[in-house]
Image (cartoon, rainbow, N blue to C red):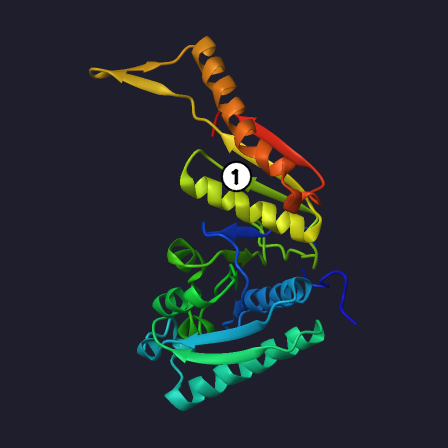
Amino acid sequence: MKEDIDPVNSGKSISILNKTRIEEGPVLAVVDGSTASYKAVWWAANYADHAEEELRIVCTIDPSKLGAASSEEDQSNIDKDSLIDTAKKILAKAKTIALGQGVTAQTFLLRGDPRKTLINISRNYHLMVMGNRATNGLVAKLMGSTSYSVAALSYCPIVVVPYKNDEKETLHLRNTMSHIVVGVDDSEAGDRILNIAAHFANSWDAELTVVSAIPQFAVSCGQLPIVLTDEEMEHIFDVHSKELEEKILPMTMCSIYWRIHNFTVEISKRY
């Protein structure tokens, strides 16, 4: 029986990065032996179970970093065979975590530069799930800190699962989504991420809040910047609000999003 709340980690939002649309296909969880990555596997298993998608788990090792120990404690004689053996144990633990959530996952061990490898295989996945805390020592040798660099160039949406907050306190995650917040702008990428967020909200029967921001504009006249007046800023704010509401209106009327609990628009005048 699955746990309703992750006992180690509850109540923290998940970062959904990248700007491509959600499609059907397998979900990929990336594991590196860190607690953060195991929590990502836990979240991915719950998502895959809810979405009725196949779950695959991958561990990527970079043999070129075998000699790049970060401290004297790391200067152990770790050969390639023992590194691979450790990676296999990491995958076995991750598979057990997924099985504990009722999901049977396939596991894969890949060799090469983690960033390039994960970006390349992201073409084949519906969603990639990663933890956001890397560690030193052997874990760093296995994979390193790759979440945000992969997210910037991946071909599928990336979910970055938090593990600790800024105060280094362990966070707790729920295995359901009840409220999703998405930040948008007037770019094509902003439109795509809005569609992704709406998809998630509809899938989880969750509340969706759409947030946008406009800066304190200034225009340049020769060498001197001109700060806009309050009245001019208010006009820009009103125009931006209307444009955003017009963009969202068709989605609120679309039948595929009828389960979204609350479609809210919040606009800040400043970053």
In which quadrant will I find the N terminus?
bottom right
Q: Is residue 13 visible?
A: no
What residue did someone put label 1 on? 183
Residue appearing at x 60%, y 42% in the figure? 181
Residue drawn at (43%, 11%), measured in percent from left and top? Answer: 232
Place of residue 153 in the rendered image (x, y in percent of width and height, measured from the top left): 37, 56
Task: Report whether 1 appears left or right of 265.
Answer: right
Residue 189 placement, left or right of 42: left
As drawn, the residue found furthest toward the bottom would be 81
Residue 226: x percent and y percent? 32, 13
Above or below, 257 against 170 in this view is above
For label 1, the SS is strand
- Quarter assignment of residue 161: bottom right
Place of residue 80 in the rendered image (x, y in percent of width and height, measured from the top left): 38, 87
Task: Tell which of 89 and 74 is nearer to you.
Answer: 89
How far from the left and from the top, in percent, is residue 268? 53, 26
Q: Looking at this view, name the residue that lies furthest to the right.
A: 1
Quarter of the view holding residue 114: bottom left
What kind of residue is marked 1?
A: Gly
Question: Residue at point 58% right, 82% down?
Answer: 92
Residue pictured at 64% horizontal, 55% vertical: 171
Q: Residues within 10 Å of mark 1 (few under 14, many from 20)?
A: some
Decide: is 268 above or below 40. above
